[in-house]
Image (cartoon, helix red, strand yellow):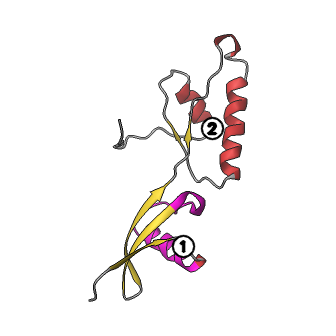
Amino acid sequence: MGEPTYRWLESPTQEEWLAIDSLLEKYNWCSLAPDFSKVLVAEVDGEIVGISCVQAMPFVGPLLVLPKWRGTGVADKLADDTIESLRSMNARGWLVVADSPHVPKLCRKHGMRQIDSPVFVSGA
């Protein structure tokens, strides 16, 4: 067993992406969106033995509608067009963080689900 070497995949080949996707699938992780991901691999004798991924997960917000325009479809149209824009960028997911009683219904309507998962943040 050799020593691991480490490298960032600067411009991954299709073969490298397939190897990463295969590894992720084997351990029940979602595949990565290449346009939003940077991958550090640990390799031994050409075999990927570990990865660390930096993913630029699109963050959606704020979505704001003036009170007198709420309930008129403005929020739905803004959400629809925002989601279409994310899909055109090949985003495989996005994050919505909001403290509004209207958000859960709007997110569910657009196929999103609320998660019960640890979320950690850094920064001030």
Q: Earlier in the sequence, mark 2 or mark 1?
A: 1
Looking at the rendered image, the quarter that the N terminus falls into is bottom left
What amino acid type should be assigned to the residue bearing mark 2? His
Q: Measured along the vertical axis of the image, is residue 61 above or below residue 69? A: below
Q: Where is residue 96 in the image (x, y as percent from the top left)?
A: 52, 37
| Label of residue 17 in the image | 1
Q: Position of residue 81 (x, y in %)?
A: 72, 38
- Disc 2 from disc 1: Cα separation: 29 Å
| Residue 5 visible in the shown view | yes
Q: For residue 47, which quarter of the picture?
A: bottom left
| Label of residue 110 in the image | 2
Q: What stretch is highlighted in magenta?
A: 15-37
Q: Helix or strand or loop: what does disc 1 sit on?
A: helix
| Label of residue 28 in the image | none
31 sits to left or right of 70: left
In this view, the residue in front, 73 or 86, is 86
